[in-house]
Image (tube, helix red, strand yellow):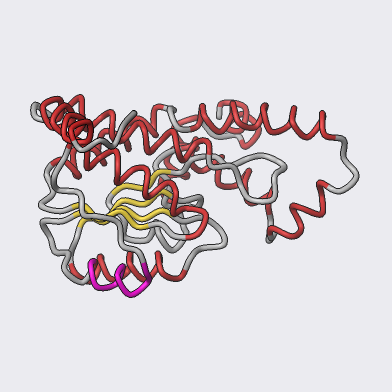
């Protein structure tokens, strides 16, 4: 940031204020968004796969490993930690929490919702179809939270759920890749994990880390989570779910 400020003839505070004026939480989020835009452009999955053609396996695996470390680190920056804490507090105080994610984001939404339901009874069961998603979010109101997960290409079902939640007056949390994207608009909390890597679909390592961090942060802040998790585990053991 200081290097950019020096080259532009401004000071570091001016760069931060410019980032915030553009709608970003701070300089780091602004920088990441522009880096991703330059790196990805209008890429599609097919183009990403095409770029893998002819490369040797060892170099691809090395690139995935290196990018994975960077993506994981992005989930724990100072800005991200603040967002995790705010999102956790919102969800702990909600009457009901709805987690929305489809296609490549379905597994993350399912994992987040399942692990959260072990500890907290205010997490709604995952919706299974687009119709179910709309039906459930239509029940949300100002006392509820809708957490939506989607990245380019953005799933229309998830966008529709986010927009419906806003119309219903619900609090909203977005895990996405663009602070100006459709899920970030109007959201109370926006989390922007980095998704670098040569694989056909953008990496989800940082996103899974955020899901784990959100649940862990809620458990830390809750006085009832331990008893709920213990009871959940005991019931499954008694039901013969584990071996």
140 left or right of 53? Answer: left
Asked if residue 135 is among those painted magenta in the image, a careful observer would answer yes
Is 70 drawn above or below residue 161 in the view shown? above
Q: Main secondary structure of the magenta part?
A: helix
223 left or right of 107? Answer: left
Name the residue nearer the viewer: 121 or 33: 121
Task: Give the x, y percent position of residue 94.
Answer: 13, 49
Which residue range is magenta in the image?
A: 129-136
Q: Is residue 22 visible?
A: no
Q: Residue at x 21, y 54 (%)?
A: 124
Name the residue nearer the viewer: 40 or 21: 40
Name the residue nearer the viewer: 115 or 82: 115
Task: Give the x, y percent position of residue 165.
Answer: 25, 65
Q: Give the quarter of the figure containing the N terminus.
A: top right
Q: Quadrant of residue 170?
A: bottom left
Q: Residue at x 43, y 27 (%)?
A: 76
Asked if residue 32 is among those painted magenta in the image, a careful observer would answer no
Task: Give the x, y percent position of residue 87.
Answer: 26, 41
Q: Is residue 135 visible?
A: yes
Q: Quadrant of residue 64?
A: top right
């Amino acid at each position: 940031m200081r290097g950019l400020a020096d080259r532009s003839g401004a000071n570091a505070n001016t760069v931060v204020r410019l980032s915030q004026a553009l709608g970003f939480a701070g300089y780091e989020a602004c920088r990441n968004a522009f880096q991703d835009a330059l790196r990805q452009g209008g890429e599609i999955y097919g183009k990403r796969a095409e770029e893998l053609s002819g490369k040797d396996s060892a170099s691809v695996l090395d690139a995935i490993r290196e990018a994975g470390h960077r993506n994981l680190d992005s989930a724990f920056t100072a800005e991200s930690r603040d967002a995790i804490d705010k999102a956790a507090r919102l969800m702990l105080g909600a009457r009901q929490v709805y987690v929305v994610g489809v296609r490549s984001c379905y597994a993350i939404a399912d994992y987040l919702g399942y692990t959260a339901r072990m500890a907290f009874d205010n997490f709604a069961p995952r919706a299974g179809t687009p119709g179910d998603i709309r039906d459930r979010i239509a029940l949300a109101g100002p006392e509820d939270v809708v957490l939506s997960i989607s990245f380019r290409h953005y799933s229309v079902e998830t966008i529709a759920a986010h927009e419906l939640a806003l119309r219903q007056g619900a609090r909203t949390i977005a895990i996405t890749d663009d602070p100006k994207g459709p899920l970030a608009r109007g959201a109370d909390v926006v989390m922007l994990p980095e998704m670098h890597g040569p694989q056909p679909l953008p990496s989800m390592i940082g996103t899974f880390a955020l899901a784990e961090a959100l649940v862990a942060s809620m458990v830390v802040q809750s006085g009832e989570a331990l008893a709920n998790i213990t009871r959940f585990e005991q019931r499954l053991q008694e039901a013969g779910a584990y071996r």
